[in-house]
Image (cartoon, coloured by chain):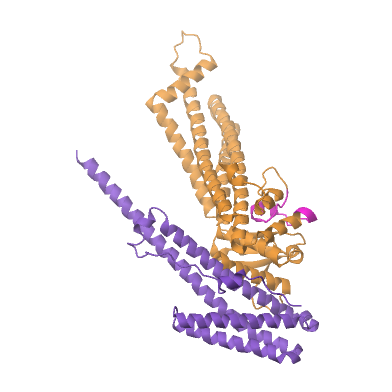
Chain colours: A purple, B orange
């Protein structure tokens, strides 16, 4: 009766094959998920760019004496748009990425300056258009932040699964040799550690 | 709040509740098969006794019957066979319940909800804000944004409905829109979105189906009862059927009751899970915590006036009304968890 051990071995092998297929599929699925989440960040960044012309348009009526501020915002926006386009053509290129980070920084400071100036125009602040736009601005910033956070959560899920046992035994063999990278802050560590400056 | 720890805890307890459901199903089936076997053999055992011997007492016959059922092969066959049939019947009615259609849009419209869609120029600022929040948090949840409805109710409440991604909706009352600031509203919507993302609605449908599987016993009992009362046949057989119907109703009521309690337990765990997931999405425990506190301190009514609200109570953010079978944990407990004021991992170990 040698049939029993043979059947057992075949059964065991079958279970192992099915199990490793499920590991393979899970790794692929998790990678696709975080890649898709990364694309979302791009979408949200573009959405932010599209919003700025509207904002400037509304503000222009009230802020006639702030042409400089508005111009700075418009200029920073178009700079950012160019940088984003270049980054899409050559993703991962260090120079291009640096340019993109710099453009984002310029845009952010221009927006901060603009928000500060809005405080001086109560009419503008109280206008229905501006209320809607500032809601849109808050939402857009949240979207960018949440898209990054969502991406990082999925990267964490992928890395956690990849490093767990038993998937860790198969990961390299199935083409997942490395952890996916978490998004870092655009700002450098030093700037984050600095206390925010408030001028009166 | 360490949301991952709380999520793991709630998921672990949820799994235990599923096991309890399965055990309940088996136990009920076993009880039914035992009753049927006892009655079957009770009815026939008297005939074998010789006329000269004194008639055996009730207790003695019962013991004999049990011995026969558990020692003879045919007795065991009947027991197992009937048990399997009982599991099958309850299983089938459960499966039928699984496929009950649950379209979130229908539920929301049922409560008089109004669909809020992007680009509608008549939207108020608050409605636009709620719509934005749904879109933002969907990015955080890595989930396609569900449809948003506003319910014309002055009470503060919200719910999620719909069995899958395509049919999922999130609904908030006008009261919630006007009383919550942006952070609180984001906490509330994140909680509802978590119900969708964690597939809690599907779980609720399944549990309701399980309980429905148990109520099938009542229908069977009623049918038997009627046939025994009004049907023709010998009185002895009628008596046996009557006893069986009563036993069935008893087993049914115990299992439905246990099922309801398990259902409420599961619902409370899914609330904790949704609170923890809301923190995962917003990374801002204060938002949902302060929304819960508004309800606790302000004494604002959360009662939905709609007559059929109770049927959907599990889906709402807050209790629709108070009962022993509470679908929601106490607010104080939820706030304490969100604000990290007690150690719950130790409690569950």
Q: Residue at position x 60%, y 42% from top?
A: B347
Question: Do we see residue B302 in this rendering?
Answer: no
Query: Quarter holding the C terminus of chain A?
Result: bottom right
Towards the viewer: A172 or B261: A172
Judged left or right of residue B104, residue A31 is: left
Q: Return the x and y of residue B291 as percentages of the image width and height.
A: 72, 59
Q: Residue at position x 26%, y 48% from top?
A: A10
From the viewer's perspective, is residue A192 above or below residue A96?
A: above
Towards the viewer: B348 or A108: A108
Q: Return the x and y of residue A149 as percentages of the image width and height.
A: 56, 67
From the viewer's perspective, is residue B44 above or below residue A172?
A: above
Towards the viewer: B154 or A137: A137
Q: Return the x and y of residue B254 as percentages of the image width and height.
A: 60, 36
Number of marks in picture = 0
Tell me where the magenta segment starts and ends, as one range. Answer: B296-321
Question: Do we see residue B176 in this rendering?
Answer: yes
User: What secondary structure predominates along the stretch shown in magenta?
Assistant: loop
From the viewer's perspective, is residue A15 above or below residue B118?
A: above
Q: Return the x and y of residue B42 as percentages of the image width and height.
A: 49, 23
Judged left or right of residue B182, residue B247 is: left
Q: Residue at position x 65%, y 88% from top?
A: A72
Query: Quarter holding the N terminus of chain A?
Result: top left
B315 within the magenta span? yes
Quarter residue B67 falls in: top left
Q: Residue at position x 55%, y 47% from top?
A: B14
Q: Which residue is at the far left?
A: A1
Quarter residue B255 falls in: top right
Judged left or right of residue A62, residue B4 is: left
B248 within the magenta span? no
């Amino acid at each position: 009766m040698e049939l029993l051990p043979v059947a057992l071995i075949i059964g065991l092998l079958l279970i192992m094959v099915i199990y490793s297929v499920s590991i393979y599929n899970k790794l692929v699925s998790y990678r696709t998920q975080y890649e898709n989440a990364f694309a979302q960040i791009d979408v949200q960044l573009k959405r932010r760019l599209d919003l700025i012309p509207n904002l400037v348009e509304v503000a222009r009526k009230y802020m006639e004496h702030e042409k400089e501020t508005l111009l700075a915002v418009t200029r920073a926006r178009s700079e950012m748009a160019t940088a984003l386009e270049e980054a899409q053509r050559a993703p991962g290129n260090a120079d291009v990425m640096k340019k993109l980070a710099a453009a984002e920084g310029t845009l952010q400071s221009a927006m901060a300056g603009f928000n500060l100036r809005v405080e001086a125009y109560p009419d503008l602040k109280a206008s229905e258009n501006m209320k809607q736009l500032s809601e849109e601005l808050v939402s857009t910033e949240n979207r960018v932040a949440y898209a990054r956070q969502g991406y990082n959560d999925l990267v964490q899920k992928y890395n956690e699964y990849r490093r767990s046992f038993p998937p860790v035994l198969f990961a390299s063999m199935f083409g997942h040799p490395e952890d996916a990278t978490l998004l870092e802050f655009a700002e450098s560590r030093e700037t984050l550690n600095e206390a925010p400056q408030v001028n009166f | 709040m360490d949301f991952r720890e709380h999520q793991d805890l709630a998921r672990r307890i949820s799994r235990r509740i599923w096991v309890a459901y399965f055990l309940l199903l088996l136990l009920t089936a076993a009880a039914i098969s035992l009753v049927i076997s006892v009655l079957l053999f009770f009815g026939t055992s008297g005939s074998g006794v010789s006329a000269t011997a004194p008639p055996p007492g009730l207790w003695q016959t019962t013991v004999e019957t049990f011995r026969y059922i558990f020692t003879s092969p045919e007795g065991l066959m009947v027991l197992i066979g009937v048990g399997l049939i009982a599991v099958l019947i309850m299983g089938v009615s459960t499966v039928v319940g699984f496929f009950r259609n649950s379209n979130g849009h229908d539920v929301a419209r049922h409560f008089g909800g109004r669909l809020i869609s992007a680009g509608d120029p008549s939207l108020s600022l608050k409605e636009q804000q709620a719509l934005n929040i749904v879109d933002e948090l969907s990015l955080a949840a890595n989930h396609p944004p569900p449809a948003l409805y506003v319910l014309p109710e002055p009470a503060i409440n919200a719910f999620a409905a719909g069995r899958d991604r395509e049919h999922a909706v999130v609904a908030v009352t006008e009261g919630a829109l006007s009383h919550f600031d942006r952070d609180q509203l984001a906490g509330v919507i994140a909680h509802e979105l978590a119900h969708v993302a964690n597939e809690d609605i599907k779980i609720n449908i399944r549990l309701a189906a399980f309980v429905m599987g148990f109520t099938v016993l009542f229908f069977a009992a009623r049918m038997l009862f009627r046939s025994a009362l009004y049907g023709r046949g010998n009185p002895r057989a009628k008596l046996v059927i009557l006893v069986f119907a009563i036993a069935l109703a008893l087993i049914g009521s115990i299992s439905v009751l246990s099922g309801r309690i398990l259902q409420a337990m599961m619902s409370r765990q899914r609330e904790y899970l949704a609170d923890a997931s809301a923190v995962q999405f917003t990374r801002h425990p204060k938002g949902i915590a302060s929304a819960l506190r508004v309800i606790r301190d302000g004494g604002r009514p959360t009662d939905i006036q709609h007559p059929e609200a109770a049927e959907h109570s599990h889906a709402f953010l807050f209790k629709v009304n108070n009962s022993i079978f509470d679908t929601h944990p106490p607010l104080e407990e939820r706030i304490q968890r969100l604000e990290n004021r007690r150690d719950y991992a130790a409690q569950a170990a």
